[in-house]
């Protein structure tokens, strides 16, 4: 991005983000200024991203989940997020359209990036989600999903898969759209915490 450090968003990028996210011009310019303040280079490193997540979850360990979220949004795999990748991440995780969200969720679960999801990959992401749920909250989970392995088994059963089967992107999206129970199981259930934190920061 040629003018990443100039302090002003390029017209092309502004139009692109207005088209692909829910944010208007004023919001995008404000986000950009705060982004540059935090990241003068115009890019967020994985460590900075981990730090942002850590501040949202002081009572838990979000590092593994943050790592996977970062990977899923680092579309050019250069180890950093530029402003566009960052805003798209914000938009999708907070209020993207269902299909966009599910495409992102598939990328999140497709840990090795080979275009399919295995049961091991489901377990890896579910485990990282569990690290963010406080021990107190874990006690309140139903018996058949109060451990990462149990929740992964439940998801796998919903998809009707055998142990070594794989799930394609189309199957994943269709399966989740057809069954709200799967949607609940594959996502982290505390986005409200993050929204409250963001509100505090804006005030």
Image: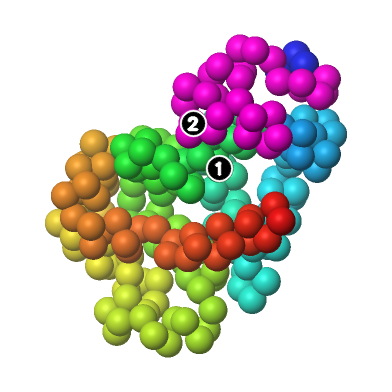
| Circle 1 residue | 90
Q: Residue at x 27, y 67 (%)?
A: 153
Q: Tell me if residue 126 comes above or below residue 173 in the rendering.
A: below
Q: Is residue 139 left or right of residue 36?
A: left
Q: How many marks?
A: 2
Q: Which residues are magenta?
A: 4-31
Secondary element under disc 2, as helix, strand or loop, is loop
Marks 1 and 2, how far apart in space? 9 Å
Secondary element under disc 1, as helix, strand or loop, is helix
Judging depth in this view, the residue of 154 and 39 nearest the camera is 39
Q: Quadrant of residue 99?
A: top left
Q: Residue at x 83, y 39 (%)?
A: 37
Q: Residue at x 18, y 55 (%)?
A: 179
* Residue 166 falls within the magenta-colored stretch: no
Residue 43 visible in the shown view: no
| Circle 2 residue | 21
Residue 33 on image: x %, y %: 77, 34
Q: Is residue 73 left or right of residue 1?
A: left
* Residue 26 falls within the magenta-colored stretch: yes
Q: Residue at x 39, y 58 (%)?
A: 187
Magenta portion: prevailing SS class: helix
Q: Tell me if residue 61 comes above or below residue 140 in the rendering.
A: above
């Amino acid at each position: 991005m040629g003018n990443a450090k100039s302090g002003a968003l390029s017209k092309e990028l502004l139009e692109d983000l207005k088209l692909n996210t829910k944010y208007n011009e004023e919001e995008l310019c404000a986000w950009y200024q705060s982004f540059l303040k935090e990241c003068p280079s115009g890019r967020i490193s994985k460590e900075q991203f981990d730090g942002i997540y850590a501040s949202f979850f002081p009572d838990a360990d979000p590092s593994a989940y943050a790592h996977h979220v970062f990977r899923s949004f680092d579309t050019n795999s250069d180890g950093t997020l530029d402003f566009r990748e960052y805003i798209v991440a914000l938009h999708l995780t907070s209020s993207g359209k269902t299909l966009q969200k599910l495409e992102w969720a598939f990328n999140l679960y497709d840990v090795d990036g080979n275009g399919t999801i295995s049961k091991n990959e489901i377990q890896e992401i579910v485990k990282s989600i569990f690290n963010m749920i406080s021990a107190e909250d874990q006690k309140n989970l139903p018996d058949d999903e109060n451990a990462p392995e149990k929740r992964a088994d439940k998801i796998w059963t919903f998809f009707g898969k055998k142990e070594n089967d794989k799930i394609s992107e189309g199957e994943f999206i269709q399966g989740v759209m057809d069954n709200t129970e799967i949607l609940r199981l594959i996502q982290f259930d505390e986005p409200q915490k993050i929204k409250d934190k963001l509100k505090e920061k804006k005030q």
